[in-house]
């Protein structure tokens, strides 16, 4: 990719509202992660030919807006306090990185803050969604390869 193409891509992504984008080609690996009021751009050449991400069903979706919060506290029917991990964007929900690997998390698994729990594919870009709380997965709310909406509950977590 030429520098001008990378700049155009970064401009497009910044206008789309996505917070994180990872792109891999034979010649280039590009990772863009954006925090509110802060942008971090990083690219590194690939030494060996890497496997491309899994093929996903084509879904025509509009660009998502910046997420307000990935989680919200909600009381469970059992009376214990739980936290919801919500979708920060519109896209397709995947429980694993590709069809041949096990899910990132399952019911009963312990998760820690910052641990990847799923992938949401939006506009052919695969975004890892991380937990913002440490605890135990109580319920998976979405089926694999299903479309999700912005702010839709993906997982219910019982905090530690």
Image (cartoon, rainbow, N blue to C red):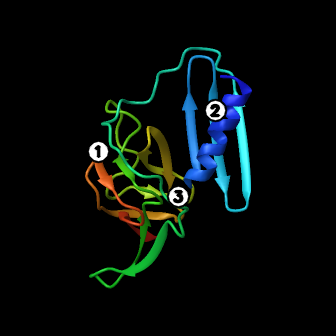
Q: Nearer the viewer, residue 100 or 160?
A: 100
Q: Residue under circle 3?
A: 112
**Residue drawn 63% across and 32% down?**
30
In front of the other: label 3 or label 1?
Answer: 1
Categorize mark 2 by other alpha carbons within 10 Å: few (<14), some (14-19), many (20+).
some
Observer able to see residue 160? no
Identify the image quadrant of residue 78: bottom left
Query: How far apart in space, not on screen, are marks 2 and 1 (Cα)?
Result: 25 Å
Residue 55, image x and y in percent? 35, 30
Say which residue label 2 marks: 30
87, 84: nearer the viewer: 87
Contact check, label 2 and label 3, Cβ < 8 Å: no
Quick check: 111 above or below 11? below
Which is nearer the eye, 70 or 75?
70
Give residue 42's position: percent from left, percent from top. 71, 37
Q: Is residue 48 left or right of residue 41?
A: left
If you read the primary sequence from the N terminus, does the residue marked by circle 2 or circle 1 appear first? 2
Which quadrant: the N terminus?
top right
Q: Residue furthest top?
A: 48
State the SS at label 2: strand
> Is disc 1 placed on a helix, strand or loop?
loop
**What residue sits right under mark 1 in the picture?**
145
- In this view, the residue farthest toward the bottom is 79
* Residue occupying the point 52% across, 52% down: 115
Left or right: 46 in relation to 136: right
Residue 139, given in percent of the width and then of the height, sits at 30, 63
User: How far is mark 2 from mark 3, CA to CA?
Assistant: 26 Å
């Amino acid at each position: 990719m030429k520098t001008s193409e990378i700049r155009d891509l970064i401009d497009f992504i910044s206008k789309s509202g996505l917070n994180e984008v990872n792109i891999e080609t034979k010649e280039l690996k590009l990772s863009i992660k954006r925090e509110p009021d802060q942008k971090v751009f990083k690219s590194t050449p690939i030494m060996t030919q890497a496997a491309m991400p899994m093929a996903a069903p084509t879904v025509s979706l509009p660009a998502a807006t910046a997420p307000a919060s990935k989680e919200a506290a909600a009381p469970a029917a059992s009376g214990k306090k739980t936290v919801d991990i919500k979708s920060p964007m519109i896209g397709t929900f995947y429980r694993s990185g590709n069809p041949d690997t096990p899910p990132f998390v399952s019911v009963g698994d312990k998760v820690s803050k910052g641990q990847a729990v799923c992938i949401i594919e939006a506009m052919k870009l695969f975004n890892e969604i991380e937990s913002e709380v440490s605890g135990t997965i109580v319920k998976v709310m979405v089926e694999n390869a299903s479309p999700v909406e912005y702010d839709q509950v993906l997982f219910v977590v019982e905090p530690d």
